[in-house]
Image (spheres, rainbow, N blue to C red):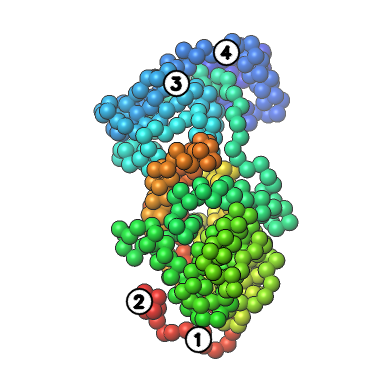
Amino acid sequence: MRTALAAKNNQNVVGGHVFAFNPWRCSPSRRDVLKAHRSFIRKAKPAVQPDKRLKAAQTLITHLADHLDADLYVRLWDGEKIPLGTRPESTVGVAIHTPTALTRLARRPRFDTIVSCLASGEIEIEGGTLLDLAAKRGEMQTKKLFKRLNKALLIKSALPFVFGSAQETARHDFTGKIADKKEAGRDDKALVQFHYDLSNHFYGLFLDPEMQYSCAYYPRWDASLEEAQKAKLDMICRKLRLQKGEKFLDIGCGWGGLVCHAAQHYGVEAYGVTLSQAQLDFTKAKIERLGLADRVHVELRDFRDISGTFDKIASIGMFEHVGIDNHQAYFQKMHDLLKPRGLLLNHAIARPAKRDDKSFRKQNSQYRAITTYIFPGGELDHIGMSLANLERNRFEVLDVEAWREHYARTCRLWCERLYAHRDAAAAEVGDAKLRIWLLYLAGCALAFERGAVGIFQTLVSKKSKGSAGLPPTRADWYE
């Protein structure tokens, strides 16, 4: 009450009183007074001195270290290295190269702010990736740690950053149109090319020789990425029970691994579509090199514009790009393209369901970061939503298989391979993109390991009366 009266009387209210007050719970007139008064204080108050920010950072991080036992360190912009536990010889840590990073985090403590700071180089992971940070952070859970901390000290240490200056940094996010999620408002070609047209050479630094950019299938947990990706291609073909002479469509065919494999080893006439020019060029060259031009055909085409009739269809890692509001149209198109009793294999990442769809579709900071810097326009549904939409579009669900742990290992191997080739990757796409991608791949690995997301292969057939015409068991899939 005293704070509000002081602001109303144009008194100089600073520090914790104004900082702790919530103007959005005041009447509009009081809110306007507080807003104007804060503006006056910021203009009148001299800029926070750099050494004051450094001292505040040292106090804050030392306090955190007192309650942690992590084999990590924080390096401040003056070069000081502060251990976050009892091991001063830690080789993995976080470097804060500028106080601006802490200013941005103090004002907006969100995951997407961290990604922005990493992209700009204001913050850097030293000696490893997010996977190494996670392995060395200790057993302390974030909520338990926060309960132990001195809240007054945290606020006092944060104030020099809250009121400090923050310079604009270069943008590394997608700036095209993604506000409208339905078909009429989406530029799917621009969304796809933002992600996939970085550089074929860049992807080749961490993918297998077949350039498979989707979850591998591990017959053994110690299998190599190359072995697991080949096993994945065979599993897809076996689940679809591809036969010589059949017409097979791969929607979102990537770099052509599946269409070429299916034509070579199962004798199908394969068709693939992509919206990535870089992928199309790579795949066409591969088809010519393998002598498959009479059996494999690829085009730069939106799935909505595909025509013809097919015996079997695969959608591998494509569904995540479509957007939840467009799932009905997507499955309807698949239904129209399939022959009666034709098979569709939908291989897609999913999130756990929540109590209601409104809660499920609420966007958190991690989602905003991924759709801003990595997958613009991407959305994940839950497996129940996928199955319901498939049945609404007159498909019969035949089999659902979870591959969550397979994708956890795949992402971990991708991250390790990219980190091992980080110098070549930086030369190809720049330091900012490299930092974003290392964070992305490591974050995905951890998300799958912890069950925050999953992935499912769902086999369905176009409904018609009578027998599905399939064997009585799945035994032939695993021979």
- Kindly identify which numbered label has been placed on residue 53: none
Near mark 2 (Cα within 10 A), the count class, few <14, some 14-19 or many ≥20, is few
Q: Quadrant of the N terminus?
A: top right
* Residue hosting label 2: 479
The label nearer to you, 3 versus 4, is: 3
Question: In the rendered structure, which disc, 4 or 1, sits on the residue that comes first in sequence?
Answer: 4
Query: Is label 4 in a helix, a strand or a loop?
Result: loop
Q: CA distance from mark 3 to mark 4?
A: 18 Å
Is residue 282 toward the left or the right of residue 36 in the image?
left
Q: Quadrant of the C terminus?
A: bottom left
Query: Is label 2 in a helix, a strand or a loop?
Result: loop
Q: Is residue 3 visible?
A: yes
Q: Amino acid at mark 4?
A: Ala
Residue 352 vertical position relative to residue 248 in the rendered view, above or below:
above
In front: 294, or 341? 294
Classify residue 94 by image quadrant. top left
Q: Is residue 11 visible?
A: no
In front: 93, or 299? 299
- Kindly identify which numbered label has been placed on residue 47: 4
Near mark 4 (Cα within 10 A), the count class, few <14, some 14-19 or many ≥20, is few
What x and y, as percent, mark residue 271?
Answer: 60, 70
